[in-house]
Every structure is written in C-alpha cells, then in structure tokens.
Image (spheres, helix red, strand yellow):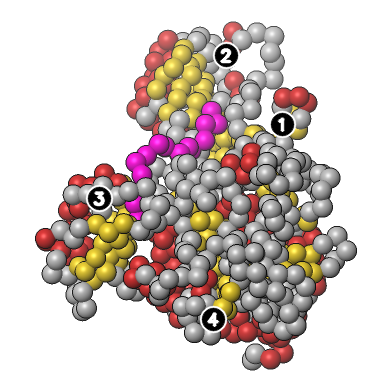
Amino acid sequence: MAAEQSDRSGEEFVEALVQLHADAPAGELAEWCAEHGIDMTPMAAGALLTGPAGRFAEAFGERPGDRAQPQSLPVPPALRGTTRSVTVLPLPALGADTASPD
Amino acid sequence: MALPMTPQYGQPAPDQVYGYVSARSRGGTPMTRAAHWDSAEPFRTDPESQQRAEDYAVAAGLSITAESRLGFSVCGPPAAYAELTGGRVETYEALRQVEMDHIRYVTQLDIVGEGQPEARGVGEVPGTDAIEAVALEEPRTPARLVPSAQPPNVDRFHLRLPGDVAMLLGATRAHARGAVGAGVRVAMVDTGQFPHTYFAAHGYQVSPTVAVLPGTSPVHDPVGHGTGESANVFAVAPGADLHAYRASDNSGSLTGAFTAFIRAKADCLGAKTEGPQVLTNSWGGSRTFPPVGPPTANDNVFALEIRDAVEQGITVVFSAMNGQFAMEPQVPGVLSVGGVFVGPGLELQASDYASGYASPWFDGVVVPVVSGLVGMRPRAQYLMLPVPPGCALDVSESRAQADGQLPDTGDGTAQDDGWALFSGTSAAAPQVAGAAAVLLAARPTLAPHQVIKAVAETAVDVTIGANHPRFNRPARIGPDEATGAGLVNVDAALSFVLDQIP
C-alpha cells in the first residue's frame, strides 16, 4: 500500500531565455508560447521559456541540444517584431562534489 | 535522542491505496471491534448486504479486487476512500521491527476526519448499514523504509550536524539567547528534498516541496544534494521554515534551476507580508576563468533577475562554487559564500576546495563575501549529512576514488544507509542562509545589504591557507579573496544587529 509518489520518466526539460527588443511588449510572445504549449515567465529583463524538448523542436524548427553549452534557436517569423534572441540555457553545476550534474 | 513514535511528514498518499471493506455482519459487531476470535462465523455477511456494500464502494470509485464471505478487498485512489468515508487518507510513520531485527520507520496510512475512529488505519462509512468498516492495508513487508535519524559513526575526522556546525559558526550561543530564526522562510533551490527522519526527529519545519519539472516527485531527490545540504540551514537556524524547490529531473540533472529560482523568488515576494525571506542556492553556471569578455547576454538577463530579487528585499545567497567560476555569486548584492576548514584542533584555514576571486565583471565585488564550513580537497568529505538511502551521493561518497593520486577509501558509510560525508560551498551557503534567518528573525526589517554588513563585519578572520588551486588566492589578515571576511559567527552578527542597527 505504501507505494510512493514517484518520478515518471519524461522528456527532457528545456529552459530558454528570450531577449526582447527595446520596449517590446511580452504579450505577443505569451500568446505564441501558449499556442505552442510552451510556458512563458516574464522576467526582470526578457522572459524565461520552459517546456519539453519536443515542444521546442516543433515551435522553433530546431531541437535543443543537451544543454552542455548555450544554444541559440532561430527566432520564428511571428516573433521577429518583438524578440531579439532565444537561447537555450546550459545546465548549472552543483556546489558540491557529486556523481551527477557536474 | 528520543525518536518520535509516529511522526508525520505530510507527504502525499500513494496514487493507489489498497484496503478492505467489512460488509454488514450477521453478528452485528464490526470486524474492527472483534473481541473473540474463536470463530469467524458471526462476522460473515449475507449476499444482499455484500452486494449493497460493493455497490457503495464502486460508486465511490473503488475497484473490487477479491471477495470473501466476510467482505471484500478494494483498491483505488485516496479520493475514492474520501468519497466513501467522508474522511481523508493521510500518511504517518511508525517505528516497526523490520528485516535483520532492525527498528525503522515504515510509512502507514490512516483515514482521518470528523466522525472517523481514533484507531489507526481504519475508517467508518456513515449513511449506510451495508458497510461496517474500512481497513487500509498495512505493509506486511516494509514497502518504504526511512533511514535512521542518527548518523553512523565513521573513523575519519568529520563534523556532525547540528551540534558541531552550530558550535563552530557561533550559532549555539545565539540559540541560547533564543535566536533560532523562528518563522523566517528559507527557500532553497536544489535537487529535491527527501523526507528523511533526521528532519522530523529534530522537529524542523519543512514545508511541502515544490517540484517545478513536470513528472517529478516532490518527495524524491535522486542526487541527495538538496536533502543533505538543507540540513545546514537548520544547524544554524533550527526555527526556520524551509521551502525546498526541486529543480532536478529524474536523472538528477538541474534542468530546471532557473525556473525554480524564478518560482521561488515569486513565492518569496508573494509571502513577503508574512515575514522576511532568504533564498539560498548551492549551484551556478560554470564559465571560463579568467573570462574572455564581459558576461554573456544570457548571463546579464539572469543576473538582473537575481539583482531584482535583492532589490525587493530578499536576501539572496549563492555558493561561491568549488573551483568553478560562475556568474551568480558575483551579482552585486548577493551574499556569496566560500569555505573555511576547521580541523580537529580547531585551527582555521581557507578551504582549498572553494572558489574565490575579485569579480572581473562587477566593479568592487569580491567572491565570497563570507565563508561557512567546507572540507578540503580532494573530496571535501567533511559533514555527515542525511540523504535519501541509495541516492547518487549515498553511493558515490561511500566508494573509493582512484584518481591517480592517493587512494581514497570513501566516507565509511554504507551505500544505502541514508547518510553521506560531503560538503563544498553547497554546504556553506545554507549555513550562511541560516545565519541570515537568525538575524532576520531578530530584526525582520533588515535589508539584504544590512544582513551582509552584519555577517561580514563580525566574521572570524582567517589568515592561513589558500583557496582552490584554480584561483590560488591566499588567506591574509583582513578581508581577502580566499574566504572573504572569514568564517561567519552568528552570535557576533546577532549582537551587531541588535546593538548597531536600530
């Protein structure tokens, strides 16, 4: 009876930073992300996009890599009026000696 | 230390709960209240009552898994049991004698709520005479063992939590003055937070974890890093309220660190009226050192997000990292934390495991601001920390490391005992976050720069040793790039706040 709430295997999770043109509103980006099943969080500067790698591949026409290095994604035509760049963020490291992330 | 008999961690009930429904008996006494066991005959039901009882159970959302003359077994989600009984399914831990004659906590379930019986593991169904009781399946073999709340004894020199860490950071005297960081929210973005018995046995306040990645569990920590390092918060601030944010995916990679930071920041701001906030982070991006140019555009964006958190009154703590050069601890206003090693003779020296440098990107910024307790290279196995049994750190730290230099025999703990010896500036950051919590509990209106001033002005200067060879900054008299202002002294910082900041 005591089966734990467990992790489910899932698709790779992607975080990407969006830089907007000066004074560009984020509303258009938010609508576009919602249409493509990507979450958008406004930030102090720009926005953070998150979601499964497959959604990013469909939306941007290019699959995010393994997040070892920053990776620029092509800005879709629908966003060119507001968005300057979209960059997949590299994975951070932990501040301890671990066998995994770093 | 006395262990609590039935601690509750508030972890969610399993998706599927197995139970048993006692249908109306011929004798009129529910099976749960049986006082004589010479015959089961009085507890048999009749076909009509059995059918009605099954109809109730199915209508509530339960599935019938087997039938007998006395009742039937069922399974279903906790919500179905709630629908049937009007109560709710909750978890608790109970000390049980398990394999190899060990006594351990084992997770149990109970139906609680208005009108439900005091007896554990059973519930009543109001509104029908077809069902006399519902009994939840009890684990016959331990389905989930939680590890010992007491750390194992190992031969090598190390520090134990909370006592050693509290003493060496001057927190013990602050605690004696009643300063324990009570009520201060300490948000921690890391790999997860496993409900280790260590936290319950000490009575620490751990709020339910927020798992930011879809499909990840809030009670799992595949690496053990977040669970272990969070114990450092409580060693210094036992009254703090820990809010853990799991940023790791199911393999343990920090794929959601930025997301978790933004979420934790938003939650801190949302709860600002409830009290002061600390946001501690034991991770960072690894960049080339010395850098070939200014921060990247992406670094700028995230740096501004961090800076914005500071400007809104959140004390943001980042580890200086362990040989890595990261942007996050350099952000102006961040309380960056390096490492000091305190040896068996209480001698202090800069940890050669920790990063430290004058920021090439931000004028006047030195990383670290201050230091916490960190071990020495090669592995910094220094603090005995609670981790999920069998997690990545539990296994890796217990193994020998053959790196071409001196053989290392591992930390002396078992691979699955839920304890591991490690540290890094990952440990120092939550220690200093705990120090900030103690100060903020005493003076809730302190701004982040006042917290930094208090811990830096009162830190114990460290004048021996040098930091990680990648930077090789020597410790000197006065502030330096090896340990910042030195080792945090919580009691002195508290006095500074109380005496010098109105």
Q: Is label 4 in a helix, a strand or a loop?
A: loop
Towards the viewer: B307 or B463: B463
State left or right for residue B161 relative to residue B208: right
Quarter of the view holding residue B119: top right
Towards the viewer: B229 or B460: B460
* Position in image of residue B402 (x %, y %): 68, 41
Instruction: Name the mark nearer the viewer: 2 or 3.
Output: 3
Spatial CA span between label 2 and label 3 = 61 Å
- Judging from the image, mark 3 belongs to the subunit labelled A
Instruction: Name the mark nearer the viewer: 3 or 1.
Output: 3
Q: Are marks 2 and 3 in contact (CB under 8 Å)?
A: no
Q: Which residue is mark 1?
A: B96
The quadrant of the image that shows the C terminus of chain B is bottom right
Q: Which residue is mark 3?
A: A56
Spatial CA span between label 4 and label 2 = 77 Å
> What residue do we see at 37% from left, 24% from top?
B58
Q: Are marks 4 and 1 in contact (CB under 8 Å)?
A: no
Can marks 4 and 1 be said to lie on one chain? yes
Is B391 included in the stretch rendered in magenta? Answer: no
Q: Are marks 4 and 3 in contact (CB under 8 Å)?
A: no
The disc at residue B365 is 4
Q: Which residues are magenta?
A: A1-15
Query: In the figure, B325 relative to B334: above or below?
Result: above
Residue type at mark 4: give it: Val
Can marks 4 and 2 be said to lie on one chain? yes
Crowd tier of the residue under label 3, counting other residues whose Cα lies within 10 Å: few below 14, some 14–19, many 20 or above: many
> What residue do we see at 56% from left, 83% from top?
B449
Q: Which residue is mark 2?
A: B43
| Sequence-first tag of 4 and 1 | 1
Q: Is residue B397 visible?
A: no
* Position in image of residue B452 (x %, y %): 61, 80
